[in-house]
Amino acid sequence: MLSDLKKNNNHSIEGIFLTLGRVEAVSSLSNWSYNNDQFAYAEIKLDSFVVNARELHHPL
């Protein structure tokens, strides 16, 4: 199956695997976030650089 994918999509196989890797990363992060809802997540704003923190700590 993987060899057929590579043979039929040789021109775009690198992009396919990069996309699969990104999907896996987002899926893993989403699962971790769902299972650890006690942690806070950063809100990213592009218009300024301000760091506000309350009860800041590393999860490990």
Image (cartoon, rainbow, N blue to C red):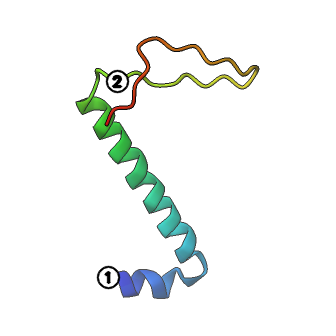
In the displayed structure image, the side of residue 58 where residue 42 appears, left or right:
right
Quarter of the picture holding the C terminus: top left
Give the spatial CA distance, label 2 vs label 1.
40 Å
**Labels 2 and 1: the sequence-earlier one:** 1
Dividing the picture into quadrants, the one containing residue 59 is top left
Nearer-the-camera pick, 5 or 43: 43
- The residue positioned 46% from the left and 84% from the top of the image is 6
> Please, is residue 48 above or below residue 15 in the view?
above
CB atoms at circles 2 and 1 under 8 Å apart? no
Nearer-the-camera pick, 40 or 57: 57
In the displayed structure image, the side of residue 5 where residue 42 appears, left or right:
right
Instruction: Give how far across and how far down residue 43 sits, in percent.
Output: 55, 22
Nearer-the-camera pick, 20 or 12: 20
Quarter of the picture holding the N terminus: bottom left
- The residue positioned 61% from the left and 80% from the top of the image is 11
Q: Residue furthest right?
A: 47
> Please, is residue 30 above or below residue 9 in the view?
above
- The residue positioned 66% from the left and 22% from the top of the image is 45
Looking at numbered disc 1 in the image, what kind of residue is underneath it?
Met
In the displayed structure image, the side of residue 50 where residue 22 appears, left or right:
left
Instruction: Give how far across and how far down residue 2 sits, in percent.
Output: 36, 81
Nearer-the-camera pick, 7 or 17: 17
Instruction: Give how far across and how far down residue 47 sits, in percent.
Output: 76, 20
Q: Which residue corresponds to mark 1?
A: 1
SS at badge 2: loop
Dividing the picture into quadrants, the one containing residue 5 is bottom left
Q: Which residue corresponds to mark 2?
A: 39
> Please, is residue 11 above or below residue 52 in the view?
below
